[in-house]
């Protein structure tokens, strides 16, 4: 029992932002879909996020044909870290979407970095 408790304590000290995107709850994914699915003529939609996440143009056009392109992008890079996602959101000028992710991290992370 002590070993399991130690693992639990250690895991609770790790920053949620270091987890992979797949660990985000669907409510956060939904907020990102609401914000990034609509096409924006200048910058800041799912196409820019997909580009920053390393997808080529052919794949981005495939995403565009899907019911939720943002969900398709997130599924395609589920093994990227949440930190990386936030960096990419900032790079495409979507601080509003980044704040949604940060809000979840602040509410759920127990690490020292997030509680300072």
Image: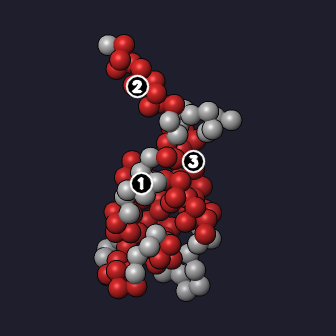
Left or right: where 27 falls relative to 111:
left
What residue is rendered at 37% in x and 52% in y?
A: 22
Given residues 7 and 16, the one toward you in this image is 7
Q: Earlier in the sequence, mark 2 or mark 1?
A: 2
Residue extending furthest right?
A: 116
The image's colouring method is secondary structure
Given residues 9 and 44, the one toward you in this image is 9
Q: Which residue is mark 2?
A: 8
Tell me the number on the disc at residue 103: 3
Q: Which residue is mark 1?
A: 21
Q: Secondary structure at mark 3?
A: helix
What residue is rendered at 52% in x and 40% in y?
A: 15
Q: Secondary structure at mark 1?
A: helix
Q: Secondary structure at mark 2?
A: helix
What residue is rendered at 47% in x and 59% in y?
A: 31
What residue is rendered at 57% in x and 47% in y?
A: 103
- Look at the image and tell me whether residue 63 can be seen: yes
């Amino acid at each position: 029992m002590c070993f399991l408790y130690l693992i639990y304590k250690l895991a609770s000290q790790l920053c949620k932002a270091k987890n992979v995107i797949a660990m985000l709850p669907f409510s956060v994914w939904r907020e990102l879909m609401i914000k990034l699915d609509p096409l924006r003529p200048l910058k800041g939609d799912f196409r820019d996020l997909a580009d920053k996440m390393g997808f080529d143009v052919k794949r981005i056009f495939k995403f565009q044909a899907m019911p939720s392109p943002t969900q398709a992008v997130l599924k395609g890079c589920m093994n990227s870290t949440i930190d990386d996602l936030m960096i990419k959101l900032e790079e495409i000028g979507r601080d509003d979407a980044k704040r949604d992710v940060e809000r979840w991290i602040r509410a759920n992370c127990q690490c020292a970095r997030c509680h300072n």
